[in-house]
Amino acid sequence: MATLPPMGWMTWQRFRCQIDCHNYADDCISEKLIKRTANRLVLDGWRDLGYRYVIIDDCWPERKRDSKTNEIVADYKRFPNGIKSVGHYLHSKHLLFGIYLDYGTQTCEGYPGSMNYLEVDADSVAKWEADYVKMDGCNSPQKSMSEGYGKFSKLLNATGRPIVFSCSYPAYIPWMKNTSLIDWKRLINNCNLWRMLGDVQDSWSSVISIINAYKLQNDVLPKLAGPGHWNDPDMLLMGNFGLSDDQKRVQMGMWCMFAAPLLISADMEKLDNFSVSLLRNARLLAIDQDKGGHQAEFIRSRNDVQMWMRQLDGDPIG
């Protein structure tokens, strides 16, 4: 599972929790948005470059679970054909279907969480034929996260369906101050990728803070990454509004050096040409998707310039 860093598209950074489809018909979290994005991924050649996962983040369900089955159900107005039909549409396009859950009592935006419903939600995910699950960590007790995510990982495996499991709980634990707060071996065994830090924002200060955090934890993070288990610095910002072209270049380049999941979060119908050129750069994608799976390591700084090195398929490069 996830022997290479996942590549694809995710709703959150660009579309957030926009649910007003009357005033923002093209931007609301809906079946329409997912289908038009899927069409662009196929018609514009993104899928064939490896961008195959289409991941729906928070705000897709109804505010309450089904009263009879206790299942989470998609918002009836925004997903009139149900969430499973969205997955079927993606699969018909030879794309992969990703969905969002939260380990807590509620999601970050107040939708039903998986606390006390882990078995139900694992079965639902398999029934929906999802290929990827992102489990967030809002509104949940920090002390039970490691065990709870581990339980959900086992429940997913028990369904018999291969599902990439993206864990967010390290981002909710102050491990930067004390790395022993996380059982790293358990994390690797339970999760295919994990968020280490808070959400990336559409700004240079956010991007450079993530890079500097990786620098500070140079003794920890590179050892965790490898085929089937990846550090996730969060979504790519190309195609949005907060970065200059040079800053976009830095984010894309460093994410590829980090062997990071490459998840675009932008309107695929409105990407600027420079962002397209970066996201489709064959050399960068080859570095990110190198089969060795080694994460770059920080070497030194000189005159405010950072030097990193990543081993590629057995060969060191600077």
Image (cartoon, rainbow, N blue to C red):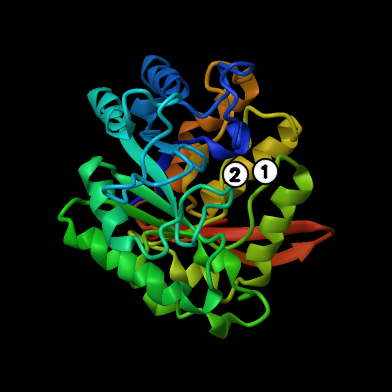
Q: Amino acid at mark 2?
A: Gly
Residue ID for mark 2: 253
Residue at image point 33% right, 59% down: 228
Q: Residues within 10 Å of mark 2 (few under 14, many from 20)?
A: some
Residue at image point 36% right, 34% down: 52
Q: Residue furthest bottom?
A: 180
Residue at image point 40% right, 26% down: 79
Q: Is residue 180 left or right of residue 96?
A: right
Q: Residue furthest front?
A: 67
Q: Amino acid at mark 1?
A: Val
Q: Is residue 202 left or right of residue 171?
A: right
Residue ID for mark 1: 250
Residue 280 percent coordinates (x, y): 49, 28
For the question of whether residue 213 can be seen, the reply is yes
Taking depth in this image into account, of 62 and 298 the one nearest to the observer is 62
In this picture, is 248 found above or below 149?
A: above
For the question of whether residue 2 can be seen, the reply is no
Whether label 2 touches label 1, CB < 8 Å: yes
Q: Quadrant of the C terminus?
A: bottom right
Residue 165 percent coordinates (x, y): 35, 56
Q: Is residue 229 left or right of residue 92?
A: right
